[in-house]
Image (spheres, helix red, strand yellow):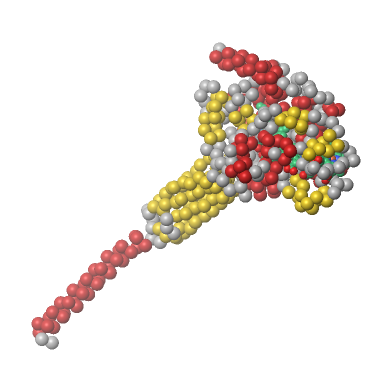
Amino acid sequence: MKKRVFFALLFTFFLLFSISAVGNASAAQFTQQDFTSQSYCGTCHRTLYDQWSQSLHAKAFSDPIFYSVMNVAIADMGGKDSDGGKLIQDYCLHCHTPIGSLTGDIPPTTATSTNAISCDFCHTVSDISGVGNGSYINSPGILKRGPFKDSFSPAHETVYSELHIKSEFCGMCHDVYHPVNGLPLETTYTEWKQSPYAAEGTTCQHCMMGSQNNARAAVDGPLRSLIKTHEFTGANVTLGKRDVAENRLKHAASIQMKTNKTEADPKEKVKLTISITNTSAGHKIPTGLTEVREMWLEVKAIDSGNNEQTIFKEEYKTVLEDDKGVHDGHVPVWRAVKVFSDNRIGPKEKRTYKKELMIPAETSGKMTIVAVLKYRSASPSLTRSLGFDDFPVIEMAKTQKDITVTNTGSLASPCRILSVILISAITAVGGAGFMLRIRHGT
Ligand code: HEC
Ligand code: HEC
Ligand code: HEC
Ligand code: HEC
């Protein structure tokens, strides 16, 4: 009964919301003919096209993980033909296939829609209606908006657009709020906005669109000292460019570890200070879909016989809570009413832990303490439930310290006792002899 009331409310909210904010899908603003296919843009902008076609923007609809999660959401909201199912589909596709949404082609059927976040979508955005939830306003047509003030193209008109070089352009979609209760679900833009990078004027484009020096933006275009690449590689090593994504992950954070000694006896305590720093990400790590992404710190001690002992493990993520107070790590975004916890590491933030390692009694030789920060795009429990292989685990940062287990304490004490006895005995014998010699006058 309670559940039914909740869903009735949810549907009403969804209906109201769809009319007010995301209703673009049903109320088509444009036709498919208003947008140009990316393959046409690619005839002149070849390099940019090749880069873009490998990006997650090109795959935002065909991405099998996205597609599967959306289908789970649709089923959970009442199925494909129900109002709830349709509304959630409209909501997801508003960002994952914006041209489909703008032209009412939902679920998308044409290549222009299924190629998701494409050239002509981004370069006809003329304004924003706020930040997040797909706040784009488009003016499709012959005029293409971009970063140049002196651009001339034989194929289309060009105009300088300040919006395109600002983070707010990316913030249109890289901040996701629950459509009913407004709960922030993905906050990459806001994390940047509150960071030192925003204050110093370093934008999303600076880091997430690589730089190409002395290059042409189009085959017949002029040689320019700087243009931006269109790979849009983040942390997704499975669907994005693996080497670039891995490299990004390996440069995002660093680990420092100190120990209060480098030699220790068995059963002695070694004090550890471990710090991890978000050195280079302009947002929290992890970011985006952080109830799904996995990042964790593992600190282990390994002895010379390869026996491992976990000293400490910490996961960094957001945990969502549903309306029944459940926060078991499996609450899907569409059922979330609250962020139960969030312990992710902010831009330039350093997190320090003080821990202790008790050297086991039987240890001798070398003991290695290893601290590793690891990342995986999604948990095996999620990928397996959707029928996919496990995502690879990437090592973001690693450091280690050796402790020499000397056994000085346990070996020295019997020796020390023995030597004390011996010295005392020699002294006693020697002393007695001396006294005797004095007495006898020799
Ligand atoms: C997610 C949105 C997005 C998509 C998709 C996209 N662009 Fe861009 N593009 C941008 C932004 C933002 C800039 C400006 C970057 C800057 O200078 O800060 C840009 C810059 C450009 C430029 C200027 C040269 C340069 O690279 O800096 C050209 C030309 C261009 N894009 C063409 C294309 C073409 C062709 C495609 C499709 C193959 C495409 N874009 C796809 C957002 C996009
Ligand atoms: C406001 C725009 C927006 C809306 C609406 C949206 N998404 Fe996304 N989605 C994104 C962005 C941006 C990312 C990339 C996040 C990141 O960096 O981790 C993403 C990523 C994802 C991913 C991860 C894909 C992968 O391969 O790792 C899944 C799954 C996903 N979205 C599902 C959904 C579902 C289901 C819905 C509807 C309930 C939805 N999204 C609605 C913007 C949106
Ligand atoms: C016939 C070749 C050709 C085609 C087709 C073409 N362009 Fe261009 N485009 C150019 C040239 C040349 C420039 C100028 C490059 C420069 O100034 O460095 C240009 C510039 C641009 C710019 C930069 C504008 C600015 O002021 O910053 C954007 C954005 C752009 N094109 C997008 C597109 C999109 C989107 C498509 C497909 C709908 C497309 N182009 C199709 C040749 C073409
Ligand atoms: C129309 C909405 C939209 C806009 C505008 C947009 N993005 Fe995205 N972006 C997405 C979606 C959706 C995904 C996730 C696709 C997927 O994984 O299925 C994504 C993925 C990405 C990824 C890959 C994330 C990963 O996990 O590897 C990067 C990087 C990225 N976007 C950067 C940018 C930047 C930089 C801008 C601004 C220049 C921008 N995006 C503008 C919707 C958008």
Q: Could one spot residue 348 in this view of the protein?
A: yes
Q: In terms of image quadrants, where is residue 259?
A: bottom left
Answer above or below: position of 169 versus 197. above
Residue 62: % across, % down: 74, 33
Q: Provide residue 102's location: percent of width, then percent of height.
A: 77, 26
Q: How many marks?
A: 0
**Which of 398/147 is in front?**
147
Which corner quadrant holds the N terminus? top right
Q: Residue drawn 67% across and 29% down?
A: 130
Q: Residue 226, percent across and down? A: 76, 49
Seen in the image, is 349 located left or right of residue 392? left
User: Where is residue 227 drawn, in percent x and y?
Assistant: 77, 47
Is residue 238 among what the camera can see? no
Q: Is residue 339 left or right of residue 28?
A: left
For image coordinates 42% across by 49% down, the residue present is: 356
Give the residue at x 77% y 29%: 138
Please tell me in which quadrant of the rendered image residue 41 appears: top right
Residue ranking furthest to the front: 149
User: In the image shown, does 413 or 105 lie closer to the viewer?
Assistant: 105
